[in-house]
Image (cartoon, helix red, strand yellow):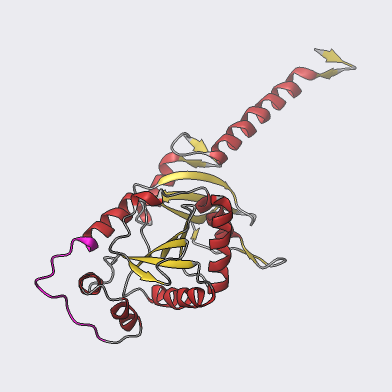
Amino acid sequence: MRRGGFHLWPFLCILLVIFFTVGKNLALDEHCEEDFETYQNFTRSEIREVLKKIKRPDAKILSIRMSPVYGLYEVVIDNKGQYELFYLDFSKAYLIPGPIIELSTGINKSVEKLTELEKKRRIDLSRIPLKDALILGNKKATNKVIVFTDPDCPFCGKFHAEMKKVVAKRKDIAFYIKLFPLQIHPDAYWKSKSILCNKSLKFLEDNFEKKPIPRPDPNCQTKEVDENINLAKEFGINGTPTAIFPDGSVQAGFLEADRLIEMVDLSIAKKK
């Protein structure tokens, strides 16, 4: 095909290559888990080597795309049910864990992305037994928030203080606490067992305040700690504190009281 001395075929071929390349990249941006050989200048084996180096060998690759900052790729993974995000530079020599802050707005773009992913995640609350959970707030409260916490987790202690502020303001909100001792805290398991054997919210709060609590009674054979650990694993909960809201949405990490109330109200609205 030739018009006015201009050859169109080479031009059309280039357009087709661009079209199919962009189409492939868009698909991978939506869901690129293991369905690529080479993407954004990375091979599958290179990404898996990166995951091995950061001790995430079995993580699923959810997306690879350009980050808000030129020169960096954004990589999102699912590591045993928990979403994680990091950045790789174009040279493939450096990994940046984040966060990336947009100076014009002050928005934490890394947290924004992870929050977006978490919003798509839902847990069926009927699968979480609450009979033996510790309750913070009014037992008759209509809105229940389930919280997986670790007695030796510093952020859990801070989060617990914010939860107390919430129930002081809102009598319609109650927190159902599931003790989930992490392996990185060697004393958390026996402390969790002691707290549950005594059904004592006070023991948990004393421990958060660095006050000593007694070791569990040898005659107490509660299985709830182990059941909570297995339940957390089943739902992909790997860290504490983790809150599950009335609509089943999940939020990992510390929240201040006002933000916590906002998220509960948003969850209630979505549930309706």
Q: Residue at x 13, y 75 (%)?
A: 217
The quarter in which the N terminus is drawn is top right
Residue in the image at 37% along x and 56% along y: 237
> Is residue 3 located in the magenta-colored stretch of the structure?
no
Residue 256 percent coordinates (x, y): 53, 73
Left or right of residue 64, residue 198 in this image: left
Main SS class of the magenta portion in the image: loop
Q: Position of residue 49 (x, y in %)?
A: 38, 48
Where residue 82 appears, as percent x and y from the top left, is 41, 53
Q: Which quadrant of the structure image shows residue 200?
A: bottom left
Q: Position of residue 80 (x, y in %)?
A: 36, 50
Residue 244 seen in the current view: yes
- Outermost residue on the front side: it is 140
Q: Is residue 168 left or right of residue 230?
A: right
Q: Name the residue located 30 percent from the left edge and 54 percent from the top edge.
A: 231
Direction from residue 106 to residue 233 in the image, left or right: left
Please report the bounds of the magenta region as a residue range. 212-225
Residue at 44% of width from left, 67% of height from top? 174
Q: Which of 107 and 123 lies nearest the eye of the viewer?
A: 123
Q: Is residue 80 visible?
A: no
Among all residues in the image, which is located at the extreme left? 219
Query: Taking 84 as reference, is 213 left or right?
Result: left
Count up the numbered dots: 0
Residue extending furthest bottom?
A: 211
Among all residues in the image, which is located at the extreme right?
A: 4
Q: Is residue 217 magenta?
A: yes
Q: Foreground: 169 or 26?
A: 169
